[in-house]
């Protein structure tokens, strides 16, 4: 096959190259790992809540890159600041032996958007350890809890245990899939990392039974995203908080998917008015333009667990990502996206519940803010997602049985009507 130059002279105005759709698919299939099941659409351009194809079709994005595009695609204010960083020559990765002003500002911002974490160790402020993809910051939090167990609780090194939940999703690297309860993420990839105990999500008695003298922490998604979009019973996070205090364990909140306004609060743990000991953020924190994630905890715990050399990442917190992160935080706060998520989410959920009441397909509608799941009786949510895509609306399934509706938080009323009309067609008509 004669390979086409990746950047041939463009005959169209959308996207990176003049490759035809067939060439794009053929090239990805020939040279890319087959680790994603694709829905088939080829997207050339993204803007706001919309995805654009070569033939001029517009598709409403109700997936928002699993919450990475909370601010919408190519938000002009974030793009402008990203371009400033590139044009100002302060964007490129720099060796981590020097300081940069943009990282300093991002760290300060990420530390102070959160309340004092782990306040039982004193009100000394928070500190931030930046990484790239979300899974890296999950592992950083695991290291924090394990070190805490070793140093503070005197658990022999190698014996530390962390409690996690059935159907958890924290990424797909080895340590994290080691405690996944979803076979396809782990079968054949052993040996797995020990030191984790999984219990049913929402079952505080099961959590209590799983605590041993070697337990150093609990890792929880305050609402489960990939696991089927489940909201824990009221009071569950508070019970976890109390248990961690009683048993001297760290409560680690993975807010990668449900934080940054997605559920109608800046952080999902705020629904129960609790304060975790460490918070993991990713996805939307960089406005969808660069990989950036953070593990934030109290200064006391961060200084206990991490010394020069005990952690690091070449690109973690590099200037371009930090410039995007600062801009994204300005947009989320400045444009009231959290409030918008709460208000629009409440309206959209009510309208979806109305559809559900007239549908023979829907088992349950659940969610908060613009994080809405529609569980279908057949268990085959993807069948509905394919029909939605035929009507130019991108959604996908969560844990097979649930249609995930999580558009960018900037969607407007007309776009909400667009979603409702299509859901009505696939679930009722
Ligand atoms: C709750 C949660 N944690 C961790 C991750 C992993 O993030 P990443 O894919 O950026 O590594 C995800 C990704 O979907 C997630 O939803």
Image: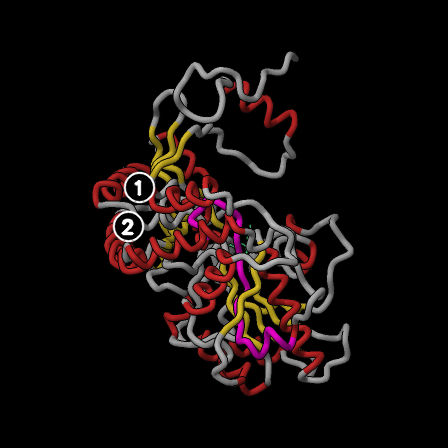
Mark seen at residue 381? none
Q: Nearer the viewer, residue 247 or 306?
A: 306
Q: In the displayed structure, would residue 426 be above or below residue 310?
A: above
Which residue sits at x=26%, y=48%? 355
* Residue 357 shows in this picture: no
Labels 2 and 1 touching (C-beta < 8 A)? yes
Residue 45: horizontal and vertical position, in percent?
A: 41, 31
Q: In the displayed structure, would residue 202 be above or below residue 95?
A: below
Q: Nearer the viewer, residue 327 or 114?
A: 327
- Asked if the residue at label 1 sits under 8 Å from ligand 1, the reply is no
Q: Quadrant of ligand 1?
A: bottom right
Region of the chain picked out in magenta, as a range: 286-304
Which residue sits at x=37%, y=48%? 405
Callout 1 environment at 10 Å: few (<14), some (14 to 19), or many (20+)?
Answer: many
Residue 407: horizontal and vertical position, in percent?
A: 36, 46
Q: In the displayed structure, would residue 40 be above or below residue 306?
A: above
At numbered mark 1, what does the secondary structure look like: helix, strand or loop?
Answer: helix
Spatial CA span between label 2 and label 1: 8 Å
Along the horizontal axis of the image, is 345 left or right of 291?
A: left
At numbered mark 2, what does the secondary structure look like: helix, strand or loop?
Answer: helix
Which residue sits at x=50%, y=62%? 104
Residue 301 magenta: yes
Mark seen at residue 423? 1
Q: Which residue is mark 2?
A: 352
């Amino acid at each position: 096959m004669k390979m086409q130059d990746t950047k041939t002279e463009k005959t169209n105005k959308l996207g990176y190259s003049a490759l035809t759709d067939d060439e794009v698919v053929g090239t990805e299939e020939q040279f890319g790992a087959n680790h994603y099941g694709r829905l088939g659409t080829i997207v050339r351009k993204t803007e706001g809540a919309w995805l654009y194809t070569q033939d001029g079709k517009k598709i409403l994005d109700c997936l928002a890159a699993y919450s990475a595009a909370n601010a919408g695609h190519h938000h002009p204010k974030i793009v402008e600041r990203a371009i400033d960083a590139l044009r100002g020559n302060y964007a490129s990765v720099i060796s981590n032996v020097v300081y940069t002003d943009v990282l300093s500002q991002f760290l300060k911002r990420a530390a102070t958007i959160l309340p004092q974490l782990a306040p039982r160790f004193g009100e000394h402020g928070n500190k931030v350890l930046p990484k790239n993809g979300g899974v890296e910051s999950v592992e950083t939090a695991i290291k924090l809890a394990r070190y805490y167990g070793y140093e503070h609780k005197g658990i022999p090194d190698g014996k530390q245990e962390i409690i996690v939940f059935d159907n958890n999703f924290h990424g797909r690297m080895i340590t994290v899939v080691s405690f996944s309860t979803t076979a396809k993420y782990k079968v054949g990839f052993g040996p797995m990392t020990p030191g984790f105990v999984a219990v049913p999500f929402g079952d505080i008695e099961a959590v209590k039974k799983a605590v041993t003298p070697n337990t150093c922490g609990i890792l929880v998604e305050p609402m489960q995203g990939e696991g089927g979009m489940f909201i824990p019973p009221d009071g569950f996070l508070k019970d976890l908080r109390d248990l961690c205090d009683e048993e001297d364990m760290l409560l680690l909140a993975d807010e990668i998917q449900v934080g940054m306004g997605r559920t109608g609060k800046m952080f999902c743990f705020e629904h129960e008015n609790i304060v975790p000991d460490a918070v993991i953020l990713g996805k939307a924190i960089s406005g969808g333009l660069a990989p950036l994630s953070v593990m934030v905890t109290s200064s006391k715990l961060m200084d206990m667990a991490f010394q020069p050399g005990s952690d690091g990442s070449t690109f973690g917190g590099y200037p371009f990502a930090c410039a995007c992160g600062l801009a994204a935080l300005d947009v989320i706060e400045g444009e009231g996206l959290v409030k918008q998520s709460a208000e629009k989410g409440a309206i959209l959920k009510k309208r979806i519940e109305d559809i559900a009441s007239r549908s023979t397909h829907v088992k349950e509608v659940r969610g908060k803010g613009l994080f809405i799941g529609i569980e279908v009786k057949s268990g085959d949510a993807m069948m509905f997602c394919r029909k939605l895509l035929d009507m130019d609306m991108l959604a996908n399934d969560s844990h097979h049985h649930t249609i995930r509706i999580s558009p960018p938080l900037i969607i407007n009323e007309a776009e909400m009507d667009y979603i409702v009309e299509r859901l009505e067609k696939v679930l009722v008509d």
